[in-house]
Amino acid sequence: MTGGPLLDAADLHVWIEGSHILQGVTFSTPATGVTALLGRNGVGKTTTVKALLGLVPRTGRVEFAGTEITTHPTHAIVARGIGYVPEDRGVFSALTVAENLRLAERRPGAPRYDLVHELFPELRARAAQPAGTLSGGQQQMLAIGRALLNDNRLLIVDEPTKGLAPRVVREVADAVAVAAERVPVLLVEQNLALVRRVADQAVVLDAGRVTHTGPALDLLDDPDRVRALLGVSRTSAGPAADPTHDRQVDTA
Ligand SMILES: Nc1ncnc2c1ncn2[C@@H]1O[C@H](COP(=O)(O)OP(=O)(O)OP(=O)(O)O)[C@@H](O)[C@H]1O
């Protein structure tokens, strides 16, 4: 593969309990940087991620690194090099940080503890601490660290700041930015200041369809378009915007 998209989704449809949740989602992510998947609450962002990973039944076509993976089972899709950090982070509370990391090791290939500890030294310092006693930001670091442990070619990170106290959001923004220096990221996020800080491209969903794609800053610098597409009145306008503010609000 030369110069093509890393991940290419075409005409994804998902039905859940009779509801047509994804109605032909089409977008691609480049092989570098952060692609933000944006949209109001309930428009289908998490369902899109699950559809990419084969976690929900869907129709359409998904290609990863030039190979069609639509019919592959989830374990085969992630084995191709996709690290997934789900919305609830999925850490095992009763296990230590080190045990959580060990459980994430995937063969073949040596686990990249050196990389994880270089990016997140706190995970080494807290190796013996039960994950359930970590702060929300530290748990998010652990979740991202687990995804970085293996030789992944793409990280999919679903709403890493959801439910976190504002002071922790900055920590998570740092963790995402640090991870993105090494591996391209598909980031589901509603905190537009964080998106401004880390995202290169933006894909906007509404009611199960893609309504906008393009450079993230082009969108964020256009308040009218942000209001129309995302239903927010503030756009975290300045480049120095504080990522602890400006979550989207659902105006539906
Ligand atoms: N397992 C399910 N059973 C029933 N409805 C579901 C299920 N999963 C998702 N939905 C519905 O599908 C729609 C899209 O949900 P999804 O979680 O993908 O949205 P989202 O954009 O990620 O929202 P949020 O920002 O609130 O996380 C919502 O209306 C949701 O209620």
Image (spheres, rainbow, N blue to C red):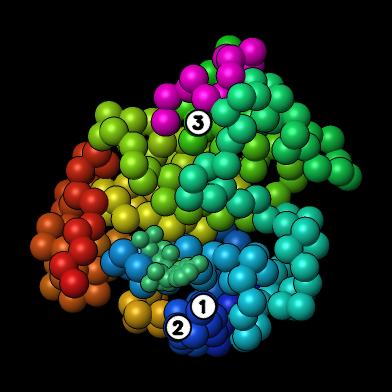
Q: Report which residue position mark 3 lands on.
A: 139
Which quarter of the frame holds ligand 1?
Answer: bottom left
Q: Report which residue position mark 1 lands on.
A: 16
Task: Give me the disc on residue 19.
Answer: 2
Q: Amino acid at mark 2?
A: Ser
Residue 87 x, y percent position in the rendering: 48, 50
For numbered disc 1, what is the local secondary structure? strand
**Foreground: disc 1 or disc 3:** 1
Distance from the alpha carbon under mark 1 to that under mark 3: 30 Å
Magenta residues? Answer: 126-136
For numbered disc 3, what is the local secondary structure? helix
At x 77%, y 68%, the residue is: 73
Is residue 171 shown left or right of residue 187? left
In the picture, residue 224 is in which quadrant? bottom left
For residue 241, above or below residue 46: above
For residue 222, above or below residue 19: above
